[in-house]
Image: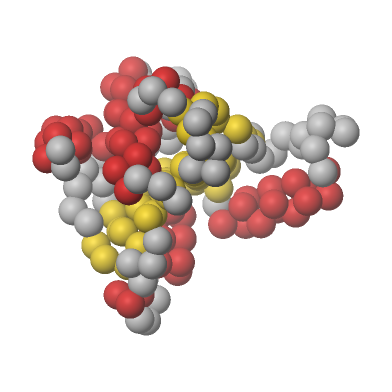
Amino acid sequence: MIMKPLLLLAALAGSLAAAGDEILLASQLRPPAEELGPGWTGPTGLVLDDLDTPPPAGAVDTATLTALRQQMKALGVRSLADFTYRRKDHPEEQMTLRVFVFASEAQCRDWIQKRYQTAGWEKHYRKVDGAWDTGLDSLEMRKRIVATGPVWITSGTVSDQADHRKALDLVLVRLKKLREEQPADPVPRPQP
């Protein structure tokens, strides 16, 4: 059962390398609930595809959202999403995917280093090999952290451990597909 996702991830390894200045929105990586399997609903959650664009007035708690946008922009994040899925028959069983798209791979690496690789990190996480630049599993909860290129993804659940990994695999498949669809040079370059 575990081998199938590992083989999928191994097959993706070459295509998840960092792409230059790709135009990527966190919302593009949202897996539909039906892809997670029968019985899942959602996702619900917050999606901010462009942190430079303020939310419409009255749409949400503007003060809290403004503070979040400023905090994330300071880290180099340009797009983020929180996707929460629930079981139809047991709504208390939920799974949350969080996707953060940084302006650059270097900013993503810097965040991973500061957040997950400080002194004593081994007491809380273990490294996981796969088709990504950095992969960690929490030793305290059912949570996986993956960074690939300028994208940082966390996936956690309070239910079956395999559910959050499947959701993360679906995000990685979407990311691979988007990168394959990118033109070789997405930004027109001025001619000399």
Identified at 35% across, 62% down, the residue is: 138
Q: Is residue 57 above or below residue 32?
A: below
Identified at 30% across, 28% down, the residue is: 173
Residue 17, quarter of the rendered image:
top left
Question: 61 left or right of 50?
Answer: right
Q: Where in the figure is residue 75, as x and y percent of width and height?
A: 56, 57
Q: Nearer the viewer, residue 65 or 144?
A: 144
Q: Is residue 50 above or below residue 98?
A: above
Q: Which quadrant holds the C terminus?
A: top left
Q: Nearer the viewer, residue 185 or 18?
A: 18
Q: Where in the figure is residue 125, as x and y percent of width and height?
A: 32, 67
Question: 175 left or right of 131?
Answer: right
Q: Which quadrant holds the N terminus?
A: top left
Identified at 60% across, 32% down, the residue is: 44
Q: Nearer the viewer, residue 120 or 149?
A: 120
Question: 90 left or right of 119?
Answer: right
Query: Residue 179, can we see it?
Result: no
Residue 169, quarter of the rendered image:
top left
Q: Is residue 25 above or below residue 146?
A: above
Query: Residue 52, can we see it?
Result: yes
Q: Nearer the viewer, residue 148 or 169?
A: 169
Which residue is the extreme one toward the bottom? 119
Q: Where in the figure is residue 180, as x and y percent of width and height?
A: 29, 22
Residue 29, quarter of the rendered image:
top left
